[in-house]
Amino acid sequence: MLSREENELLTRVGPGTPMGETMRRYWMPALLSWELPEADCPPVRVRLLGEDLVAFRDSSGRVGVMDELCPHRLASLWLGRNEEDGLRCVYHGWKFDVNGQCVDQMNEPEPFAQKVRVTSYAVNEMGGVVWVYMGPADRQPAPPRFEYTQADEAHRGVTKVLEECNWLQAFEGGIDTSHAPILHRALRKEAGHLGIPPATPFVQGRPPVLEVETTDYGYRYLGIRRLGEDRQYVRGYHFVMPFTQLRPGDGVSEDKEKTTVSGHHWVPIDDQNTMVWNFNYTFGETPFDQSEREHEGGGNSRAYVDYDNGFKAKGSRRNNWMIDRSVQKVDTFTGIPGINAQDRAVQESMGAIVDRSREHLGPADKAVIAARRLLQQAVTAVREGANPQGADDSYYAIRATQKVFSAAIPWQQELMPEMYPEEVLVADGR
């Protein structure tokens, strides 16, 4: 459990809050690149860490992300004209480039544009994602070169969906491995497309024993499940500070042509809303099909998410997360369609910000407890003028994996070479 004071510390992310200032020391995914499809396209609203921003792609293809309000009379720049390498406010014609510099003032007989700037943030477009850094310029971290951002477009998929609760409970639900074979369980083989099929090691294995090992970027953690007397199923994950998880792709397969890794970023919009980013990629030779790229089975495709309305989930508290009690009786444990939709339902059901002083945690919650400790340490580091953990390139050469093998073999022997594979090091030139 956390005290109410500790809970406040970790959940509040607005400007000037301890966790908000810590979050601003990392690159954050802000937009899918296709939301700004071409030069001089319409601008897009973005809300991050309680700040209302506007993003645009200028005539040269560069992306700018800045305060939504024009510094003149505070009209919204989202209404602006995207023209000739700048975004022009429609109220009085003040125009700003991607760096936030005012470059023209249509209403002024003696312009003083060189004296005016709007708050803007560093941008890095990589892996089909527009990333934003909102912290001090002299503390800008290494570029966000997760392995999926380096994969060919045909071999990766990235989606996102709004979750209507605080970032920490969304994140903690994601890194918790013990819930997966329960919450996401399909009750019969025919319902496998709606959840985790009953014949998988996830469901057949015993409750997991967790091992958590701290790293430079956060920690690696293992869910170890015994299968019968002499076999074990081990899932190897990574937590990358402050809100990223890498997990093995679906299923345990010997098909080395399409070996996959998945993951999430739980990015705070404000104290009560989170944008959940979902990525997957294959490092085999076979590319993804469209359903894999859109995370169809996870409940993140257009069938489940309104892409044109702020990426809001179609299942929410307002319609009881589309629960079907007849399906719950015979097909899936929850009766809620989509694995990630099931996560959103239980996490949103806790309320906007859960009171962690009421919790009763156990050994299965080791990963959650360890993450809270690292987040508190990161806040302390920033307060003391240091860089927080993970704000470097230490996560470039990691990969999640899973395996079924003899219970007599230590997991380190089987999984460590795959969790830190040499081919990633070679690809990074390190």
Image (cartoon, rainbow, N blue to C red):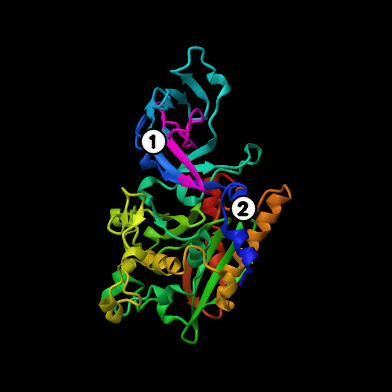
Going by the numbered disc 1, the residue's amino acid type is Pro
Q: Which residue matches tag 2?
A: 390
**Counting other residues with Cα less than 10 Å from the Cα at mark 1, is it few (<14), some (14-19), or many (20 or more)?**
many
**Residue 51 on the magenta span:** yes
Locate residue 225 relative to residue 294 in the image: left or right: right
The first of marks 2 and 1 along the sequence is 1
Q: Which residue matches tag 1?
A: 43
Splitting the image into 4 quarters, where does residue 328 fall?
Answer: bottom left
Splitting the image into 4 quarters, where does residue 360 fall?
Answer: bottom right
Label ID, residue 32: none
Magenta extent: 47-76
- Secondary structure found at label 2: loop
Question: Would residue 411 be visible to someone looking at this image?
Answer: yes
- Residue 202 or residue 19, whichever sits in front: 19
Going by the numbered disc 2, the residue's amino acid type is Gly
State the CA–CA distance, disc 2 to disc 1.
Answer: 31 Å
The residue sitting at 47% across, 19% down in the picture is 104
Q: Where residue 86 sits in the image (x, y, percent)?
A: 43, 26
367 w.r.t. 208: above or below: above
Q: Residue furthest front?
A: 73
Mark 2 or 1, closer to the camera: 1
